[in-house]
């Protein structure tokens, strides 16, 4: 198959959704498909093309001042440029089918793909694009509800990366929301083979935004004894306020901010830690948690959407009520029982290696796309649009 994947962010831009798109694209190529990606960029030309891991990537020159995050202006910039360059990308790739990561903004090119080029598309929900999950953007979902209806009306299929996220998205979709979970590269993210004496170390982070509930993690960490460290990975809009809190509370010697890390440094950071904290207000299927588990870390996770499907309570980690007191109690017990923590980390690594891989995820998408084309919804007439 010739597959177009579109996402408003793609490595080196973005977070978990960007990384998932890249892994799925690369693995689909490994499975024998031809894959192109339409995404945001900031190069000197309006549209640049290169090839990475066998994937053809078109990057639209967009407004994108921050690599780790995108606000309304950045998303609007991408969708405007993507609409302009879509005919050129379609002409070059001749895709039979498309996967659009995130209902908004990327899904906004969907109706044009179907109505102008007769290319069926799949909408892949990732989290905040599901109405109601993120309170701060409810007004945006209300404003865009007519457009949401149009995007989903013309879609050929709809997916979500967890059962609970699919349940949240289902009321807005005319079709069953199919679950295709994230994978993890367990050949790259592996447990440490040796360790040096050091304080017990928690890690947390990713994209430092409100969803991750990082202020609650810091508040809980204040209650732990001085022999424990906290490393906050990644970057984002909350970093400055978090650093100010760390300074005000006298925690600078125990709390460390790493900023964005390349893959090698990220793996090394996981391998030098003992436990991941994923205390999000909601989750889909967390890439950070998967990577940490593959690296031999158990996970303390809030008992919320997404986490309950990923973490096996008392086997690969601990599910706790989303309160600071519950988190303090769990962190204290985990840090005081390092041998049990290490054992659960080994179980976590074995579980993700046996059950979750990008190959399995990519095959699920390939099966779905092939089924769509078999039903006769393929894009054989897409070139006719250019001859009108």
Image: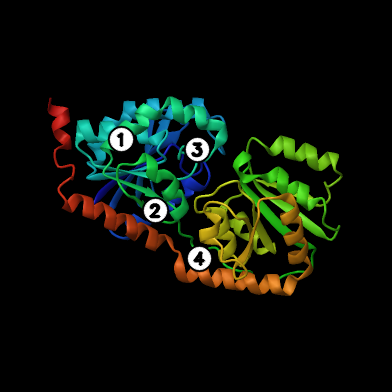
For marks 2 and 3, the one nearer the N-term is: 2
Rounded to the nearest whole Å, what is the CA distance between mark 2 and mark 3?
A: 27 Å
Instruction: Name the residue carrying label 1.
Output: 110
Rounded to the nearest whole Å, what is the CA distance between mark 3 and mark 4?
A: 33 Å
Disc 3 crowd rating (10 Å Cα; few below 14, some 14-19, many 20+) is some
Report the mark closest to the observer, 1 or 4. Answer: 1
> x and y percent of residue 311 in the render?
56, 62
Kind of element beneath mark 3: loop
Rounded to the nearest whole Å, what is the CA distance between mark 1 and mark 3?
A: 22 Å
State the residue at coordinates (82%, 50%).
222
Residue 229 is left or right of residue 163, and the answer is right
Instruction: Name the residue carrying label 3.
Output: 132
Disc 4 crowd rating (10 Å Cα; few below 14, some 14-19, many 20+) is many
Instruction: Name the residue carrying label 2.
Output: 24
Report the mark closest to the observer, 2 or 3. Answer: 3
Q: Do the residues labelled 1 and 3 touch (CB within 8 Å)?
A: no
Q: Do the residues labelled 2 and 4 touch (CB within 8 Å)?
A: no
Report the mark closest to the observer, 2 or 1. Answer: 1
Which quarter of the rendering shows the C terminus? top left
């Amino acid at each position: 198959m010739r597959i177009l994947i579109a996402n408003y962010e793609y490595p080196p831009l973005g977070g978990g959704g960007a990384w998932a798109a890249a892994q799925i694209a690369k693995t689909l190529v490994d499975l024998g498909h031809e894959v192109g990606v339409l995404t945001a960029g900031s190069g000197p030309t309006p549209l640049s093309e290169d090839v990475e891991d066998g994937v053809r990537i078109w990057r639209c020159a967009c407004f994108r001042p921050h690599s780790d995050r995108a606000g309304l202006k950045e998303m609007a910039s991408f969708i405007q440029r993507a609409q302009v360059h879509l005919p050129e990308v379609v002409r070059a790739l001749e895709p039979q089918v498309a996967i659009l990561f995130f209902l908004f903004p990327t899904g906004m090119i969907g109706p044009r793909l179907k109505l102008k080029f007769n290319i069926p598309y799949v909408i892949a929900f990732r989290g905040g694009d599901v109405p109601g999950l993120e309170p701060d953007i409810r007004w945006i979902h209300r404003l865009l509800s007519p457009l949401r209806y149009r995007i989903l009306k013309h879609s050929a299929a709809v997916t979500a990366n967890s059962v609970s996220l699919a349940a949240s998205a289902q009321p807005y979709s005319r079709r069953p929301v199919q679950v295709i979970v994230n994978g993890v590269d367990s050949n790259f993210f592996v447990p440490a083979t040796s360790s040096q004496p050091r304080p017990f170390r928690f890690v947390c982070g990713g994209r430092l935004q409100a969803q991750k509930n990082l202020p609650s993690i810091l508040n809980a960490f204040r209650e732990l004894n001085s022999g424990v460290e906290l490393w906050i990975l990644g970057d984002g809009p909350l970093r400055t306020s978090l650093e100010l809190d760390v300074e005000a509370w006298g925690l600078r010697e125990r709390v460390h901010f790493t900023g964005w890390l390349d893959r090698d440094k990220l793996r090394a950071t996981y391998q030098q830690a003992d436990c991941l904290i994923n205390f999000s207000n909601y989750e889909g299927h967390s890439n950070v948690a998967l990577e940490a588990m593959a690296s031999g870390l158990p996970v303390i996770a809030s008992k919320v959407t997404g986490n309950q499907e990923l973490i096996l309570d008392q086997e690969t980690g601990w599910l706790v009520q989303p309160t600071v007191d519950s988190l303090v109690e769990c962190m204290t017990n985990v840090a005081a029982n390092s041998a049990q923590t290490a054992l659960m980390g080994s179980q976590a690594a074995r579980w993700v290696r046996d059950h979750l891989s990008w190959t399995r995820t990519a095959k699920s998408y390939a099966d779905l796309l092939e089924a769509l084309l078999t039903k006769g919804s393929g894009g054989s007439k897409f070139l006719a649009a250019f001859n009108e």
